[in-house]
Image (cartoon, helix red, strand yellow):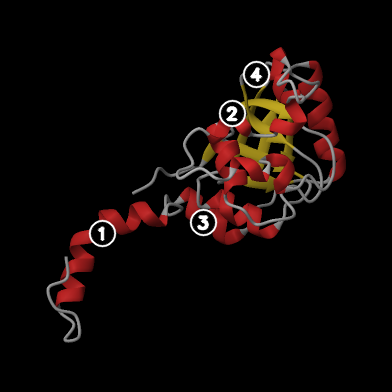
């Protein structure tokens, strides 16, 4: 069974801007891979590097945020194409969770089945968190999915998360593939008890 995710914590990466779409998160030309391995290095590639592959100014290139694992965003993050590669690239770049004003529904769902909580808070709370992390990048942010709060420094803020996603994360039910593999013997037993399935393996 997948790990239960009741708490997600780490240092923050503030990424301001509304309507950051999946093509910006992972450009389409990097989606030709057979597996998702290695996608992490292409997260926000065109935002982070120029045509000569030289680093541009971007939060994920800043030394003070290199160890960050909690992305802090604004409105409608993950909009556009529903490509699974977007959250896969974030996961493989080290992102454990995302705090934002709002998320595209399919993007948030894709994140949940990868074990990445996407939690929301009002504009003022997000702005305060971004400014705090900008000034104190070593701050550890704690996302508590049991109590629906985020704690950092001396602050705490209430958060919201889709009920189904929250349930699957805190109960370790978010990885359906792992559940199927671990239940193989039960699936085989059930399949072989059905008159229209013979010799299931």
Q: Secondary structure at mark 1?
A: loop
Q: Quadrant of the C terminus?
A: bottom left
Q: CA distance from mark 2 to mark 1?
A: 34 Å
C-alpha separation, residue under disc 3 versus residue under disc 2: 31 Å
Say whether marks 4 and 3 touch (CB < 8 Å). Answer: no
The quarter holding residue 143 reads top right
Q: Kindly identify which numbered label has been placed on residue 41.
A: 2
The answer to which of marks 3 and 1 sits earlier in the sequence is: 3
Residue mark closest to the camera, 2 vs 4: 2
The residue indicated by pointer 3 is 167
In the image, is residue 89 above or below residue 174?
A: above
| Percent position of residue 14, x then y | 76, 29
Where is residue 60 drawn, in percent x and y?
70, 24
Question: In the picture shown, does residue 107 fall above or below 42?
Answer: below
Residue 170 visible here: yes
Instruction: Tell me which residue sits at (65%, 18%) in the image.
Output: 66
Q: Are marks 3 and 1 in contact (CB under 8 Å)?
A: no
Residue visible at 69% across and 56% down in the picture: 81
- Residue 75, image x, y percentages: 81, 48
Residue located beneath label 4 in the image: 66
Q: Is residue 26 above or below residue 56?
A: below
Q: Which residue is located at x 79 percent, y 31 percent?
A: 129
Callout in the foreground (2, 1): 2
Which of the marked residues, 4 or 3, is nearer the chain's N terminus?
Answer: 4
Q: Which residue is mark 1?
A: 183
> Which numbered disc flags the more N-terminal residue, 2 or 4?
2
- Dividing the picture into quadrants, the one containing residue 124 is top right
């Amino acid at each position: 069974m997948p790990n239960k995710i009741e708490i997600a914590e780490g240092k923050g990466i503030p990424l301001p801007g509304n309507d950051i779409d999946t093509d910006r998160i992972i450009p389409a030309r990097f989606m030709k891979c057979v597996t998702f391995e290695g996608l992490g290095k292409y997260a926000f590639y065109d935002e982070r590097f120029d045509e000569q592959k030289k680093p541009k100014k971007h939060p994920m290139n800043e030394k003070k945020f290199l160890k960050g694992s909690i992305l802090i965003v604004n409105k409608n993050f993950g909009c556009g194409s529903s490509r699974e590669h977007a959250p896969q690239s974030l996961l493989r770049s080290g992102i454990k969770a995302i705090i934002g004003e709002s998320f595209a529904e399919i993007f948030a769902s894709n994140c949940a089945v990868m074990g990445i909580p996407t939690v929301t808070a009002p504009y003022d709370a997000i702005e305060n968190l971004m400014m705090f992390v900008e000034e104190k990048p070593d701050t550890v942010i704690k996302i508590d999915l049991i109590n629906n709060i985020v704690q950092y420094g001396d602050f705490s803020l209430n958060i919201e998360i889709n009920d189904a996603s929250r349930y699957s994360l805190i109960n370790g039910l978010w990885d359906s593939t792992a559940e199927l593999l671990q239940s193989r013997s039960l699936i085989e037993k059930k399949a072989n008890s059905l008159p229209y399935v013979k010799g299931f393996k």
